[in-house]
Amino acid sequence: AQSVTQLDSQVPVFEEAPVELRCNYSSSVSVYLFWYVQYPNQGLQLLLKYLSGSTLVKGINGFEAEFNKSQTSFHLRKPSVHISDTAEYFCAVSDRGGGFKTIFGAGTRLFVKA
Amino acid sequence: GAVVSQHPSWVICKSGTSVKIECRSLDFQATTMFWYRQFPKQSLMLMATSNEGSKATYEQGVEKDKFLINHASLTLSTLTVTSAHPEDSSFYICSARGQVAGGPDFNEQFFGPGTRLTVL
């Protein structure tokens, strides 16, 4: 079974500052890793995913994440945030086996202040 | 990317009635569909996994007689909340997994926009 821990429930940050949203996972099998963003009263939008290969993954809206197998982490970063980045961010893990169930972390609320 | 739609986007119903939510993959065939439930300010909790033509697999603690899932075709899955009560009020999100034409050799999972259910 897999589990995902998002270490920060809320992250306030000023506009144009850098931000890092932390995510750790545990799994007994190889996994795929994802970051999703959810705006109020909307569904999920995929920011980026790690399937294999380069451990640094670039996504949409200037976000990137780095897969660290030894630390079982997949932290999300952006060098300069905008007001419009205010949203809920979910880290998720999916097993590479036949089930492909996706398990979500509790979410991190990113609040960008002017 | 691929599109997954849900209908309705929101529904209000009286306690004791049943509500059906549809999830469709619009431009690809979904080998597997998943149903999630999200309470306000909380994460998505997987309710069940369904494969076309077979019975859904429910997560522990999810009442299969209350949340009926049908996956009759490769593009449609339905979730019926039977005898709904106020505690069933929630945001229900489906996702569909399948290979998109021209996409990577990986069965990606695409999420619908969600259905907000309010039971009075």
Image (cartoon, rainbow, N blue to C red):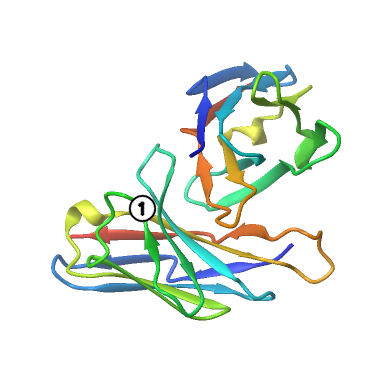
Q: Nearer the viewer, residue B105 or B96?
A: B105
Total numbered badges shown on the rendered structure: 1
Write the residue at 52% across / 20% down: A7
| Residue sitting nearer the eye, A69 or B6 | A69
Which residue sits furthest front? A28
Dot 1 lies on which element? loop
Q: Where is residue A112 in the image (x, y as percent from the top left)?
A: 61, 24
Is residue A111 left or right of B101 when viewed as pictured? left
Question: How busy is the neighbourhood of tag 1: few (under 14 within 10 Å), some, or many (20 plus)?
Answer: few
Q: In this view, does B1 lie above or below A58?
A: below
Q: Where is residue A102 in the image (x, y as percent from the top left)?
A: 54, 48
Residue type beneath disc 1: Glu
Q: Which chain carries label 1?
A: B
Q: Nearer the viewer, residue A11 or A58?
A: A58
Query: Dividing the image into 4 quarters, which one contains the C terminus of chain B?
Result: bottom left
Quarter of image, res A65 = top right
Q: Which residue is drawn at 80% across and 35% down?
A: A57
Determine which quarter of the picture holds residue A13: top right
Residue matched to label 1:
B59
Pick the quarter of the image with the N terminus of chain B.
bottom right
Q: Where is residue A82 in the image (x, y as percent from the top left)?
A: 71, 29
Q: Is residue A25 left or right of residue B41?
A: right
Q: Where is residue B67 in the image (x, y as percent from the top left)?
A: 29, 65
At 52% from the left and 65% from the top, the residue drawn is: B33
* Residue at the outermost left position: B16
Residue at horizontal 33 percent and vertical 67 percent from the top: B11
